[in-house]
Amino acid sequence: MSNVDVVITGLGATTPLGGDVTSTWDALLAGVNGIRSNDAEWVERYDLPARLSAPLAVEPTDVLPRVQARRLDRCEQIAVIAARQAWADAGFELPGDERESVDPDRLGVSIGTGIGGPKTLLDQDDILEQQGLRKVSPLTVPMLMPNGPAAHVGIELRARAGVHSPASACASGAEGLANAWQMIQNGRADVVVAGGAEACIHPITVAGFCQSRTLSTRNDDPAAASRPFDTARDGFVLGEGAGVLVLERADHAAARGAKVYGRLAGYGMTSDAHHITGNHPEGLGQIRAIQNAVRTAGLTAADIGHVNAHATSTVVGDVGEAAAIRKALGPHPVLTAPKASLGHLVGGAGAVESIITVLSLYYGVVPATRNLEDLDPRVELDVVTGQPRKVELTAAVNDSFGFGGHNVALVFTAA
Amino acid sequence: MADKPSDAQILEGLAGIVEDIAGVSPEDVTADKSFVDDLDIDSLSMVEIAVQAEDKFGVKIPDDELANLKTVGDAVNYVSANA
């Protein structure tokens, strides 16, 4: 059975490198660092060993109207912002009373998050404790629920084909895109607004990651802290951000003369069934995810010229992924690891990095991986360092893996 | 105890709360307006408005009373009668 052709017609993002896609992409190509010292008072108060973060470059409350912002958790705010950008970029207008840009019954949303709104949950718990029931916000549940970002985007754009919110930790954004592709394949929708969002730089989240020993503690040198594939890597840096793509049936896009960035040609999703935080020692789940994605796309390993790696800068994870990529595809793909610049956006990562993958295909250039000075010898792959590299690409893979053993690989092809 | 507020003072105070919670311009908050139909305020925001009004005017607004406050004028009258 051949696939329905699914094209990408709109991109939106807000990240530690910029408040939109263009500023993020330009900063990434220029080698800008998005990692900062985390100077929040609670870092000192709890004596947290990891004192770094990758905060948003643009505060969402500076973008959204005040009344709308106060009804949304930060994670929901950035999903709405990225979705609006993607929607406008696709050439659609926000729904008015008189006119719909897309038939609402044929419009879907699939936006994942890893955690949802922990700050809302804990702030409201403090209010309950200190001030009692009547001061607890009636918006508490809709602000903390992990389907909130997708639901708000769905309401704003009047999407009635279905609104979905996969939760697969750091693979959530990629799974959002995979589900969106499937919605179009299944004939449920012509257009799906898809991606992921996360904004969970909060004492409890950071403390939890500290206790699982997954964060970098290179506190004295933020710009060098996130260093995927480098021998001196010591953990990831928690970031926040959202990425949203408009996926559309190719004939639907062609009929309205839409600009096309590229195609989402297929996906592979597998699970490790091994350990709640560690990946499978032989990378079996990751290998199968990549292979399935390539096969679903109707391609072979030789067609994949580029991999945008998940590579979070952890000691174990990076070499495991590199081995899986080599086994699944061979030694030829050119790699980049954008978390060196962006930090780890958790549920936003797979979506933002998919946007970067699409732009790499579109412009024929792969961004360099910051801080990669001494490639781990176990990474037997070509990782771009120093300057961005011009590469003629027809197909690329974006990897995303999440706590729980979730493996998602997406295959994008050029327009 | 402060003096009992006038209806005009209650209306002004309510308008400030409604602006803070729902972003409605104070001049649009007039006695004849329906919270839901005219001012586009949902049930969640009504709960927030009621809690703030309770604090501002020193009244209790139980849920069964809140359900009867359809218009801004209803709310002004309720506060006036119970403050």
Image: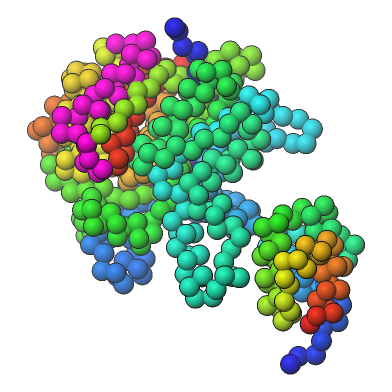
- The residue at the point 26 percent across, 47 percent down is A236
Seen from this angle, which residue lies furthest front? B64
Position of residue A205 relative to residue A263, above or below, is below
Horizontally, is A174 left or right of A327 in the view? Answer: right
Residue nearer the viewer, A102 or A360: A102
Horizontally, is A377 left or right of B17 in the view? Answer: left
Q: How many marks on residues?
A: 0
- The residue at the point 85 percent across, 68 percent down is B74
Q: In what quadrant of the picture does the N terminus of chain B appear? A: bottom right
- The residue at the point 42 percent across, 17 percent down is A265
Position of residue A34 relative to residue A40, above or below, is above
x and y, in percent, of residue A305 in the image: 29, 18
The residue stretch that appears in magenta: A274-300
Residue B62 seen = yes
Seen from this angle, which residue lies furthest left? A377
- Give the quadrant of residue A29: top left
x and y, in percent, of residue A88 in the image: 61, 33
- Give the quadrant of residue A373: top left
Q: In what quadrant of the picture does the C terminus of chain B appear? A: bottom right
Seen from this angle, which residue lies furthest top? A1
Seen from this angle, which residue lies furthest right? B32
Residue A363 seen = no
x and y, in percent, of residue B44 in the image: 67, 58
x and y, in percent, of residue B76 in the image: 84, 72
Q: What colour scheme governs how the chains and residues are painted in the rendered image of this protein? A: rainbow
- The residue at the point 10 percent across, 32 percent down is A378
Horizontally, is B71 left or right of A75 in the view? Answer: right
Q: Is residue B31 magenta?
A: no
